[in-house]
Amino acid sequence: MKRTSIIVTLLVTMTVSINAQDVIVKRDGSTIISKVLEVNTSNIKYKKYSNQDGPTYTINKADVMTINYENGEKDVFEEQGDTNQAQSSSASSTGSSPATAMSDSDIEAEICSKKPYVLFKKGDVAEYCFRRKGKQTTMMMGMGPTYLQQIVADTKVENGQLIVYHKQAFFNKKHQPSKGISATFKDYYFPVEIDTEGNYHLTHNILQDIYMVTKRRGFGIFVTDDMKQGMRLKTGTIQDEVKNGFGNTVKTAAIYTDWEVVGEENITVPAGTFNCIKITGRISQRDGEKGKEYGQQKVTCWMAREVGIVQYECVYDSDKSREPFILYLNKLN
């Protein structure tokens, strides 16, 4: 029964933020991570997400292209012709010119310079293996793939953000494609949206996303460029509609709590030695919207810039041995 619970838990995913993190995308391509308080006919009022007890800021609605809300909804604002014309006229009279919007290439260059904590360059491949009790194992501890690859299949700039499309490939112990799972995921992608500050919402858990998601709401842990020891990470719950092994659509949820930054640490894996940010927290699972929680676990991740997860360890509360199940970086191309 315990083994079944662990396997089922490995088929469920990551979170949505409870503490509202709304992304305001300005027309110049820059972004503001915020808590939006009010949108009226001419202005948008917000607080900085990192200081929600601080001052309230106001921005001209004409300067904003979109607001991407924490619940997955989006407001899109059309350019106001009269306002833009007035700005141009005013600029001409003073001998200056209007602010130039960042080009797609400038946005991508700005994000690349931040070296975010995720694999984001098109064509990059990170291969992972699994270990428990000091020995290499498979993804489902005796069943399933021996190797997992995360591949950056494509990227594009949209709404002032770099959208990175991850896909997964699975291989058996002979390094041959795992026919069933690999065929299923052949044309399936997991998008990650990175803003110009190098922050992103982790929407894809490479260890747990081994099923077809037909509908996903929200995002995972909010990973910031400036993670430091003692920092509490914004977390929440993600709700998925997924296809199970029988082809049926079921509702699942993963609940993330108490995630924080432990500190910096160098970690050595077969792919090399990496300077990482170490984060830790708890995850529990739930079937449906009001089902009973199960599969409670303690998780520790080591994340490096331009790579993302270097090592991921989870220990289930029900496992008396307290031996972690470990995913680790085997190769990086």
Image: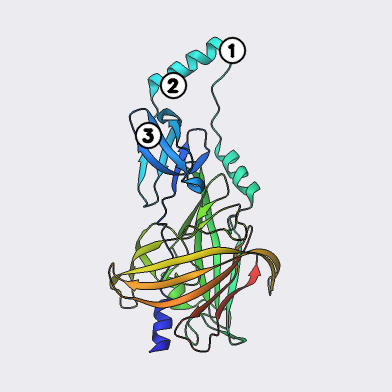
Q: Residue at x 62, y 43 (%)?
A: 109
Q: Which mark is residue 191?
A: none
Determine crowd level at label 2: few under 14, some 14-19, many 20+ residues with C-alpha closer than 10 A.
some
Mark 3 belongs to which amino acid?
A: Phe
Q: Of marks 1 and 3, which one's residue comes earlier in the chain?
A: 3
Which x, y percent locates residue 46? 43, 39
Q: Which quadrant would the N terminus be assigned to in this image?
A: bottom left
Q: Of marks 1 and 2, which one's residue comes earlier in the chain?
A: 2
Q: Secondary structure at mark 2?
A: helix
Which x, y percent locates residue 84? 44, 21
Is 324 above or below relative to 91?
below
Closer to the camera, 26 or 150? 26
- The CA distance from mark 2 to mark 3 is 13 Å
Mark 2 belongs to which amino acid?
A: Asn
Determine crowd level at label 3: few under 14, some 14-19, many 20+ residues with C-alpha closer than 10 A.
some
- The CA distance from mark 1 to mark 2 is 16 Å
Figure label count: 3
Residue that carries the numbered disc 2 in the rendered image: 84
Mark 1 belongs to which amino acid?
A: Gly
Which x, y percent locates residue 53? 46, 45
- Please say whether residue 55 is visible from this viewpoint: yes
Where on the picture, by quarter, is residue 82? top left
Determine crowd level at label 1: few under 14, some 14-19, many 20+ residues with C-alpha closer than 10 A.
few
Q: Secondary structure at mark 1?
A: loop
Indicate left or right for 274 with 150 as reference: right
Q: Secondary structure at mark 3?
A: loop
Residue that carries the numbered disc 1 in the rendered image: 95
Residue that carries the numbered disc 3 in the rendered image: 77
Which x, y percent locates residue 21? 44, 49
Closer to the camera, 225 or 112? 225
